[in-house]
Image (cartoon, rainbow, N blue to C red):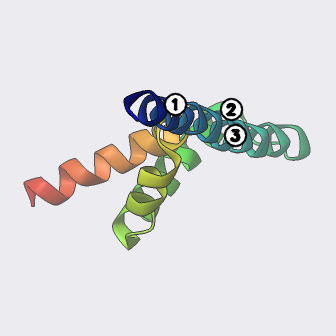
Amino acid sequence: MAARSKIVERRKDIMDYVKAFVVGGIICAIVQILMEKTKLMPGRIMVMLVCTGALLGAVGIYGPFSKWAGAGANVPLLGFGNVLWKGVKEAV
């Protein structure tokens, strides 16, 4: 019985890694397409990502998405924007 729960736990961990990899990859692919199809400079795209993360955090969408996606959503610049928003919300 204990071995079975370890297998289930290990499977859940592996799926968390896969989900984080896929979500992070999708975010990076969207940014890559944006860089190639527009004439926006990389710095402006990074600012857009941070602002988008802050906006999604302010609206309340980023929190549940971050819990579901894990590190795949928290590591890119969208996560940084969300963290900035959290700091502003706590300070005010």
Q: Position of residue 9 (x, y in %)?
A: 45, 35
Hey, what amino acid is under mark 1?
Ile
Query: Which of the two labelled residues, at mark 1 and mark 3, occupies the earlier sequence position?
Result: 1
Q: Which SS class for mark 2?
A: helix
Q: Looking at the rendering, in which quadrant would you find the N terminus?
A: top left
Hey, what amino acid is under mark 2?
Pro
Among all residues in the image, which is located at the extreme front?
A: 1
What is the quadrant of residue 11 in the picture?
top right
Q: Position of residue 29 (x, y in %)?
A: 78, 39
Q: Which SS class for mark 1?
A: helix
Name the mark nearer the viewer: 2 or 1. Answer: 1
Give the residue at mark 3. Answer: 22
Give the residue at mark 2. Answer: 42
Give the residue at mark 1. Answer: 7
Dot 3, crowdedness within 10 Å: few (<14), some or many (≥20)? some
Hey, what amino acid is under mark 3?
Val
Q: CA distance from mark 1 to mark 3?
A: 22 Å
Q: Position of residue 59 (x, y in %)?
A: 39, 72
* Image position of 76 with respect to 78: above or below: above
Q: CA distance from mark 2 to mark 1?
A: 43 Å
Q: Is residue 88 left or right of residue 29?
A: left
Query: Which of the two labelled residues, at mark 2 and mark 1, occupies the earlier sequence position?
Result: 1
Depth order, front residue of 10/87: 10
Task: Identify the residue shown where x is 40% and y is 55%.
Answer: 54
Dot 2, crowdedness within 10 Å: few (<14), some or many (≥20)? few
Task: Identify the residue shown where x is 63% and y is 37%.
Answer: 24
Depth order, front residue of 85/11: 11
What is the quadrant of residue 56 in the picture?
bottom left
Task: Identify the residue shown where x is 50% and y is 32%.
Answer: 13
Task: Identify the residue shown where x is 70% and y is 40%.
Answer: 22
Depth order, front residue of 68/30: 68
Among all residues in the image, which is located at the extreme left?
A: 91
